């Protein structure tokens, strides 16, 4: 029986917060915060999304995305480029540095996931992933799901 004080929402929030802290600790060695990691992940997956698209994916205000990109551009993680179809639009492309470190970034993420899943069997992991996909689908129909899931093109 689930204790009265425990809820799905709190458990998901606590798990997400623990995951974010683990990412901050590991990616911090590279100078990336969890927010920067998520932005870089989307830039790598999409190959050059617009700033507006990144704001939607990260669920933050466009001005906050702009500031985040400014810091990441200064650190050499991303580059802004003009959209060849609309010069008013700026695309956010992963830099040569980010592309060169893509495999290392993926390995670091996989290490964090492996640590998070210690003590969970392969069948339990598969069930957990399916349950989370179902929750996302259920809430997407109600307009609540976050756009974009998965890591570097790997959705599990």
Image (cartoon, grey):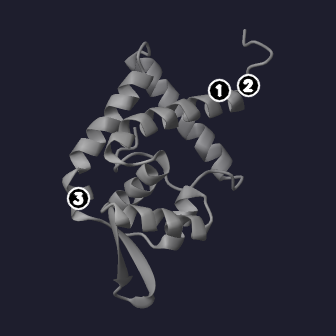
Image quadrant containing the N terminus: top right
Find disc 3 in the rendering and name its residue: 97
Reply above or below: 32 against 107: below
Residue 131 in sight here: no
Q: Is residue 18 above or below residue 79?
A: above
For marks 1 and 3, the one nearer the N-term is 1
Q: Which residue is mark 2?
A: 7
At a point 42% along the width and 34% down the height, the residue shown is: 25
For disc 3, the neighbor class at 10 Å (few under 14, some 14 to 19, many from 20) is few
Rendered view: 154 above or below 81? above
Q: Decide if residue 9 is on the left or right side of residue 52.
A: right
| SS label for mark 3 | helix
Marks 2 and 3, the one that precedes in the sequence: 2
CB atoms of marks 2 and 1 within 8 Å: yes
Q: Residue at x 59, y 52 (%)?
A: 146
Q: Residue furthest left?
A: 100
Q: Which residue is mark 1?
A: 11
Q: Residue at x 33, y 34 (%)?
A: 110
Q: Does residue 85 appear to the left or right of 129 in the view shown?
A: left
Q: Secondary structure at mark 1?
A: helix
Q: Residue at x 39, y 23 (%)?
A: 115
């Amino acid at each position: 029986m689930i204790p009265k004080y425990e809820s799905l929402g709190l458990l998901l929030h606590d798990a997400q917060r623990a995951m974010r802290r683990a990412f901050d600790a590991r990616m911090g060695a590279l100078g990336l915060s969890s927010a920067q990691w998520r932005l870089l992940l989307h830039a790598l997956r999409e190959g050059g999304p617009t700033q507006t698209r990144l704001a939607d994916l990260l669920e933050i205000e466009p001005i906050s995305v702009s500031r985040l990109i400014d810091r990441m551009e200064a650190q050499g993680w991303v580059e802004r480029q003009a959209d060849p179809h609309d010069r008013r639009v700026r695309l956010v492309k992963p830099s040569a540095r980010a592309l060169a470190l893509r495999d290392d970034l993926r390995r670091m993420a996989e290490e964090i996931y492996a640590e998070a899943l210690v003590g969970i069997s392969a069948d339990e992991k598969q069930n957990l992933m399916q349950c989370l996909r179902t929750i996302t689908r259920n809430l997407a129909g109600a307009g609540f799901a976050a756009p974009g899931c998965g890591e570097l093109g790997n959705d599990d």
